[in-house]
Image (tube, helix red, strand yellow):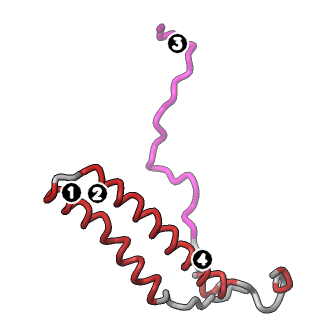
């Protein structure tokens, strides 16, 4: 590799001069945006909340039992399977709950359901 004077080099820009002026003016939040509406969604059902809790506890319980019992492979495989089944069921319940409240009742797109 040669360092000839004809090669172009990148130089660090100076940070003392402002390249663009700072942004000024009013900042709009989501509540102030025109035509924005808040979608009210029902809270999770008791089944969904219970399954979420069980799903959170699957791995800690499996790891404690694997350390205490010494049976690593069956417990970890069981934890993977149970966690996948619970994740799918919780996702299904949450998507049903969100789908019931996300359909527009008036305006464009209301007749697409």
Q: Name the disc covering residue 75, or none.
A: 2
Q: Is residue 35 left or right of residue 52?
A: right
- Vertical side of 2 occupied by 88: above or below: below
| SS under mark 2 | helix
- Point out the tag, 1 or 3, that comes first from the N-terminus: 3
Label 1 vs label 4: CA separation?
34 Å
Label 3 vs label 4: CA separation?
64 Å
Residue 102, image x, y percentages: 67, 84
Q: Over which residues does the magenta segment extend?
A: 1-23
Q: Which residue is mark 3?
A: 5
- Residue 10 within the segment the image draws in magenta: yes
Residue 20, image x, y percentages: 58, 56
Q: Residue at x 59, y 77 (%)?
A: 95
Label 3 vs label 2: CA separation?
67 Å
Task: Classify residue 77 by image quadrant.
Answer: bottom left
Point out the frontmost of discs 3 and 2.
2
Label 2 neighbourhood size at 10 Å, few (<14), some (14-19), many (20+)? some
Point out the frontmost of discs 1 and 4.
1
Q: Which residue is mark 1?
A: 66
- Vertical side of 77 occupied by 26: above or below: below
Task: Classify residue 27 by image quadrant.
Answer: bottom right
Label 1 vs label 2: CA separation?
6 Å
- Point out the tag, 3 or 4, that comes first from the N-terminus: 3
- Residue 32 within the segment the image draws in magenta: no
Q: Is residue 106 left or right of residue 58?
A: right
Q: Which residue is mark 4?
A: 95
Quadrant into which the C terminus falls? bottom right
Point out the frontmost of discs 1 and 3.
1
- Disc 1 vs disc 2: Cβ atoms closer than 8 Å? yes
Label 1 neighbourhood size at 10 Å, few (<14), some (14-19), many (20+)? some
- Vertical side of 68 occupied by 50: above or below: below
């Amino acid at each position: 590799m040669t360092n000839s004077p004809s090669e172009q080099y990148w130089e660090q820009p100076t940070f003392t001069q402002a390249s663009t002026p700072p942004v000024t003016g009013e900042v709009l939040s989501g509540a102030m945006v025109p035509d924005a509406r808040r979608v009210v969604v029902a809270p999770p059902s008791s089944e969904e909340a219970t399954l979420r809790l069980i799903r959170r506890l699957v791995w800690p319980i499996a790891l404690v039992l694997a350390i205490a019992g010494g049976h690593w492979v069956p417990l970890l495989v069981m934890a993977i399977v149970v966690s996948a089944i619970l994740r799918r069921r919780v996702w299904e319940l949450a998507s049903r709950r969100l789908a019931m409240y996300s359909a527009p009742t008036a305006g464009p797109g209301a007749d697409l359901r």
